Amino acid sequence: MSLSRLLLLLCLGVTLVAIGCHRAPASHTDQKLIILGIDGMDPDLLKQFMAEGKMPNFSALAGKGSFRRLTTSIPPQSPVAWSNLITGMNAGGHGIFDFIHRDPKTLQPYFSTSQVEPPKHGIHLGSWVIPIGSGKAEQLRHGKAFWEVLDEHGIPNSVFRIPANFPPIKASGRTLSGMGTPDLRGSYGTFSFYTDDPMKSAGAVEGGQIIPVQVQDSQVKADLIGPDNSFREGSPASILPFTVSIDPLEPVANIEVQDQQFVLREGEWSDWVHVDFELLPFLGNVSGICRFYLKQAHPRFELYVSPMNIDPADPALPISTPKSYSRELTDEVGEFYTQGISEDTKALSAAVLDDKEYLEQARTVLAEHRRIFDAEFPKFHKGLFFFYFSSLDLNSHMFWRLMDPKHPEYDANLAAQYGSSIEDFYRQIDQVLGEVLPKVDDHTTLLVLSDHGFAPYNRSFNLNTWLLNNDYIALKPGAADTDEAFANVDWSRTRAYGLGLNGLYLNLRGRERAGIVEPGAQADALLAEIKAKLLAVRDPKNNAIAITRIDRATDVYQGPYAKTGPDLLIGYNRGYRAGWRTILGNFPADVFEDNTNPWSGDHCMDYTLVPGVLLSNQPIAAQAPALTDIAPTIFAEFGIPQPDGMMGHSVFSSGQTQH
Ligand SMILES: [Zn+2]
């Protein structure tokens, strides 16, 4: 190392152990491990921002320690990727293959990582149903999590907001659930938008609901929508009335809900507002928190209300270990978004929030995460500390179009205002690293990693439409495209179907409800045929190859669940992704479409095109480390023998790695 570089590091306040020499021998009880999990941090963007001097702390870490690309999961979707990290196994071992799975018997899609079930039985009294027993939330990820193994060996640990851990598994340390945590309605986030604008059509939009209201005598009376009330016959949504009084002259409104009232100016967000939904008179209340945003007072009334979040001070469903921890955290840092994907990307996609408004909301999310980090990191003294940040992922999804002039949704005016948004979030993550580096001493290993990288999403490929056009799917006569999954599919003549972002399934006899493809030679031949045809597909717009890689599940998955997922994993070319509606089993007219959604960057592609990053203060020996190596790395750091079934190796030892 040059002297000038050493001085530079000292000036930055960075304490790092010397690379090249052997690491200070520490007994495993002294050993500390810090992992920053940065969803969606892309190696090329990181390199660019480092070269431009915008990421001084990452530059210091990469310069002094190591920086590698980190092989992501197949497919490269966050729930799959983080589950690889959590368990040290691929999807065959943990059973998470996609955001969306299907029940082969009903062919209905469902979220892959958890399910929330109301009580199964109840006594009917008039319009009330008194439940017997209680409902439950169930985590669907299999395999032992790395912190369970640490607990077994008495290594202290805390794991904040790691995806695919809702409801949180039993743990000795503090954990807080992250991506996969629902809102109070059981969805991944459903906003409400109240307006008297007749141009806005009422009803459900993806991730939200447009609710028509009337302004009478400068007042709006409407209802907040809460969880389905399983105490009522038919389980209608519970509601809570609120009143908005609009100032006739000023762009200001007074909002009254339960015993609270507050004033919002146009363009202003409320703090978190506590509300209680009464499910049974005097008995069953469910507490929620939400934020109001007065988008417009005059001439049209427009009020956005965030998804109703589980109240961390009084959680209706478990979101932390110990259970009391989320309340204690609230006492320390105030309320915060508890829904797993907190950035309201759906409100931007639905044009309910514009770029500026969405950005304010997304910045609030990161500010909350940083508040939690700032409260917890100083308490870390031994064992393992893991903290997850979502901002780079969600905001790269939403703002790629304003960073990339080649994107179909690029807008020069908007780019002038918001083109640096992704960079701004990267800089904030660099600031977080700047808080960590001074605490990295001789007994501390630091890993900064992402689950996958990023790429533009310019063009959609509608896999189910392609399968239909190529006679692998048959529809019933006269059937039209509907929003219901596979509503008009004639399964007696259908051989394969697409579901989720990267999955293709055969309609297999003995597995699917009305399977017609024989397992074995017939299935193998069909998969080979479809694979060859898909790899040859060219985009008529520019003659580009749409799909660069297809993996067979039997080639890439090991473990007890290897046969429960898709049969083929479709790896789209950079710039391509499965279209919005094909994912859920629908059939848009065209195979290819421009992606006009503000959701303009993505990573659900050929996994070799979107690697993540791995940085460490220690020399990384592995030339091609993978997510499945991280759990083995954690165990090696604490001298714990690697549990059976884990496939990787510590990245600090040189060994061959499977993905
Ligand atoms: Zn993502």
Image: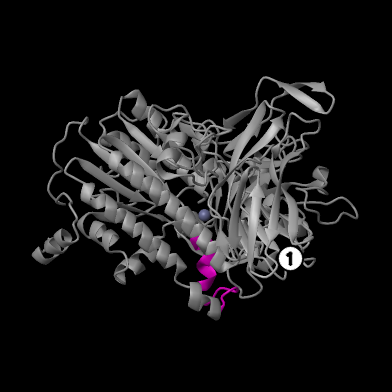
Report the residue that reaches farthest toward the bottom. 412
Q: Which residue is drawn at 67% across and 66% down?
A: 297
Q: In which quarter of the image is the C terminus?
A: top left
Visible in this render: residue 239? yes
Residue 127 at x, y percent in the picture: 83, 28
Q: Nearer the viewer, residue 355 or 226?
A: 226
Q: In this view, does 637 lie above or below 486?
A: above
Residue 403 visible in the displayed image: no
- In the rendered structure, the answer to whether residue 432 lies left or right of residue 425 reads left
Q: Judging from the image, what secondary structure is the residue with disc 1 in?
A: loop
The residue labelled by disc 1 is 590
Place of residue 108 in the rendered image (x, y in percent of width and height, measured from the top left): 72, 41
Query: Residue 518, located in which quarter of the rendered image?
Result: top right
| Residue at the image position 74 percent from the left and 58 percent from the top | 219
- For badge 1, the amino acid type reads Asp
Residue 399 part of the magenta-drawn span: yes
Note whether 585 is above or below 152 in the view shown: below
- The residue at the far right in this view is 478
Query: Residue at 60% of width from left, 36% of height from top?
Result: 287
Q: Tell me how many marks there are.
A: 1
Taking 504 as reference, is 232 above or below it? Answer: above
- In this picture the colour scheme is one colour
Tell me the crowding category of disc 1: few under 14, some 14 to 19, or many 20 or more residues within 10 angstroms, Cα based: few
Q: Residue at x 76, y 66 (%)?
A: 197
Task: Using the image, determine if residue 301 lies above or below residue 111.
Answer: below
Q: Is residue 333 magenta?
A: no
User: In the image shown, does 175 or 356 lie closer to the viewer?
Assistant: 356
Which quadrant of the figure contains the N terminus?
bottom left
Q: Nearer the viewer, residue 53 or 490?
A: 53
| Drawn side of residue 538 relative to residue 48, left or right | right
Q: What range of the chain is rendered magenta?
A: 395-411
